[in-house]
Image (cartoon, rainbow, N blue to C red):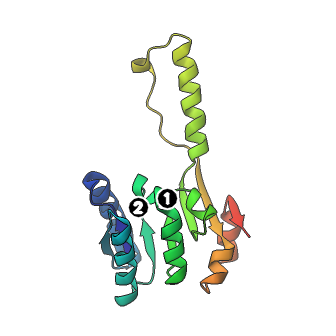
Amino acid sequence: MGVLVNPTDATRADTTVTDVAAAARMLGLEIVVLNAATRGEIDVAFETLARDRIEALFVAPDVFFNIRRVQLATLAARYRVPTTYAVREFADVGGLLTYGASISDAVRQVGVYTGRILKGEKPADLPVVQPSKFELVINAQTAKAIGLSVPDRLLVAADEVIE
């Protein structure tokens, strides 16, 4: 299993690799870390996936990858690599599967906090809030295009299935 990280954000990259490696060990999987910080390096990462016959890919959460989401989803489809992402917007552009904190819920929370601050509360007095809503989105069109059969129990568990 490949893990694509942006090495320019070393802390996030290291944390992602550590977390994915721990999960992979529990599942008996081996991971290969791929680094990309430019458009060209993303292309090279997918060439490496194909050459080394890596069977699946997880794209780490990263602003750079969010900006390059069309490129990532297109390459994953071209190379027929089942790929998962942490941000829902990847599924909208053809990404296979996303699971992560709800961005719309986070934006709503920002609005709530803004309102509280405008009413006079001190920002330092507001509690730190962790995400509480996570979304699973599956792009069934992409699954079909890459020849992947998604189990019914996963489709039923999804918050949204893009047909």
Who comes first in sequence, dot 1 or dot 2? 2
Left/right placement of residue 98 relative to residue 15 reads right
Q: Is there a contact, CB below 8 Å, between mark 1 and mark 2? A: yes
Near-viewer residue (143 or 21):
143
Spot occupied by residue 79 in the image (x, y as percentages of width and height): 49, 84
Checking the image for residue 12, the label placed there is: none
Mark 2 is on which residue type? Ala
Is residue 126 something that shows in the picture? yes
Q: Name the residue carrying label 2.
A: 60
Mark 1 is on which residue type? Ala
Near-viewer residue (8 or 27):
8
Instruction: Say which residue appears at 30% left-offset and 58% top-offset.
Output: 13
Instruction: Say which residue appears at 32% left-offset and 53% top-offset.
Output: 12
Which residue is situated farthest in the top direction here? Answer: 120
Spot occupied by residue 39 in the image (x, y as percentages of width and height): 38, 67
Q: Image quadrant of residue 93?
A: bottom right
Look at the numbered disc 1 and give the secondary structure of its residue.
loop
Checking the image for residue 86, the label placed there is: 1
Q: Image quadrant of residue 127?
A: top left
**Within 10 angstroms of label 2, few (less than 14), some, or many (20 or more) residues?**
many
Left/right placement of residue 13 relative to residue 68 reads left
